Image (spheres, helix red, strand yellow):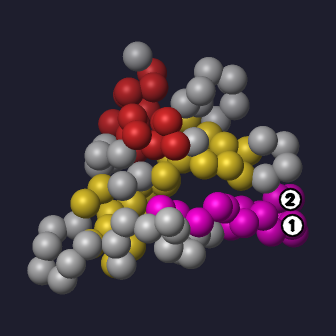
Amino acid sequence: GSTGFGGYGLVKGEERIDFPPFPDNGYAVAIVDAVFVDVDGDSYSEMVVLATWMKRVGEAAEHNNVVFDWDGNGFQRLPAVEEQVAQMASASAVKQFFAD
């Protein structure tokens, strides 16, 4: 499922392109950071959005990061890469992981 929580990018400052919805993992979503890094070896950078989610009031927030790839027509999520970065807490951790 999805939360309906998402975002959008601006192309050339004018055209709005929506991101696919974020996964439905909780109710209190907080965007922590975003980093651009080549995650799939195609020499183009994808956007990794570092986010936290709360499942229940009083519980600690969990990391659950989302990866967006531009396919020429729109942003697509990359679930296989999202699994790799799901628990990463910082942009530097994401960059280091894909630099190796």
Q: Is residue 20 above or below residue 84?
A: below
Separation (CA) of disc 2 from disc 1 = 7 Å
Residue receiving disc 2: 12
Judging from the image, what secondary structure is the residue with disc 2 in? loop
Q: Residue at x 64, y 61 (%)?
A: 20
Instruction: Tell which tag, 2 or 1, sits nearer the viewer.
Output: 1
The magenta stretch spans which residues? Answer: 8-23
Q: Residue at x 45, y 25 (%)?
A: 98
Q: Residue at x 26, y 72 (%)?
A: 55
Q: Position of residue 65 (x, y in %)?
A: 42, 52
- Residue 62 belongs to magenta span: no
Quadrant (top left, top right, bottom left, bottom right) of the C terminus: top left
Which kind of residue does numbered mark 1 sit on? Glu
Q: Position of residue 97 (x, y in %)?
A: 38, 27
Specify the quadrant of the image occupied by residue 91: top left
- Residue 17 belongs to magenta span: yes
Identity of the residue furthest to the left in this view = 58
Q: Position of residue 80 (x, y in %)?
A: 49, 36
Residue receiving disc 1: 15
| Number of on-image labels | 2
Which kind of residue does numbered mark 2 sit on? Lys
Identity of the residue furthest to the front in this view = 1
Q: Is residue 41 above or below residue 52?
A: above
Q: Nearer the viewer, residue 65 or 98?
A: 65
Q: Nearer the viewer, residue 79 or 96?
A: 79
The reply to whether dot 2 and dot 1 touch (C-beta < 8 Å) is yes
Side of 78 where 75 appears, left or right: right
Q: Say whether residue 92 is visible.
A: no
Identity of the residue furthest to the top in this view = 100
Q: Is residue 83 above or below residue 24?
A: above
